[in-house]
Amino acid sequence: MTFTNAAADEQAVFWNERGGRGWVQHIERLENWSAALNRRLFDAVAIRPGERVLDIGCGGGLTSAEYARSAGVSGAVLGVDISETILRVPRERYAKTPSLKFLCADAGTHDFSNEAFDVVASRFGVMFFSDPVKAFANIRSGVASGARLRFLCWRSIKENPWMGAPALAAFSVLPTPEKLPPGAPGPFAFADPDHIETVLHCAGFQSVTCEPVDELLALGGVENALELLTHVGAASRPLAEASPKDREAAREAMRLVLMENDTAEGVFMAGATWLVSGEAA
């Protein structure tokens, strides 16, 4: 399914403004809850010394830095993100890592044809392309035949109560957003593995597999988790647009859901992803 460039423009505005500022504000929380998933991705990517790596949707650069450590001084890593706001973080963090560079660009349209990446990796950065077939075909133009593709993407919201349950609670107070059609750009664009395989095959990748990965996500304490999900997730925009009274009522409904999942070590809720693997044909 193809969507207009307006969707891509909207994503760029969001991540360079409110979405990006929220990400930076909560970057430590975001990196902490994804630690278990990061390990699964790193094992699957398996960077070797000397390899050239493209990291799509690199965010704060944590994944890019891990790839750079594995690739060593003879390798090179390019972290790409659509948000200049977010990229200020990794550029400062990793300024002294010469093999690691960061580029503000849309990986779906940026010209990679003069590159020769050995690996393309992404942690939740490829679900927002307005035209995923064209986007992955563009990425394919920057890699050698046989190059590895590895990425994590969310399965359905029903399988992700860490996002779905608090959002549903918020929508008991706030108006429920219009449901997006299957495959629309967004966190759950690649919930259907058949859709993933079709997109990647059409874009020039082969041997595509989608392995389910289920992890309990550590969201921190209740208030920590509430702050995170207020600014990142399915209810973040409706919360930002709500009146102060409705916003607080919705946050209280979310708090109750989080309290139901609280433990002595903090809030833990299930997360469900696909670990997608493929090779450039």
Image (cartoon, rainbow, N blue to C red):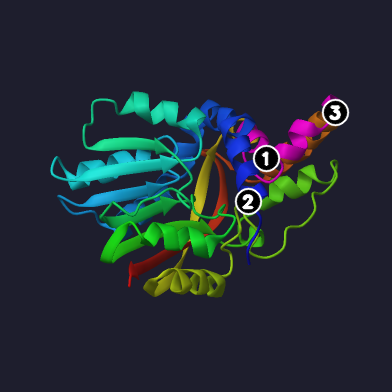
Q: Amino acid at mark 1?
A: Met
Q: Nearer the viewer, mark 3 or mark 1?
A: 3
SS for dot 3: loop
* Residue at 82%, 32% in the rendered image: 242
> Please, what is the dominant secondary structure of the magenta stretch?
helix
Q: Are marks 1 and 2 in contact (CB under 8 Å)?
A: no
Q: CA distance from mark 3 to mark 1?
A: 24 Å
Is 7 drawn above or below residue 191 in the view shown?
A: above
- Mark 1 lies on residue: 259
- Mark 3 lies on residue: 243
> In the drawing, what numbered circle is on residue 5?
2
The percent position of residue 281, horizontal first and vertical second, equals 32, 73
SS for dot 2: helix
Q: CA distance from mark 1 to mark 2?
A: 40 Å
Closest to the observer, 17 or 220: 17
Q: Amino acid at mark 2?
A: Asn
> In the drawing, what numbered circle is on residue 197?
none
The region drawn magenta spans: 227-245
Closest to the observer, 54 or 242: 54
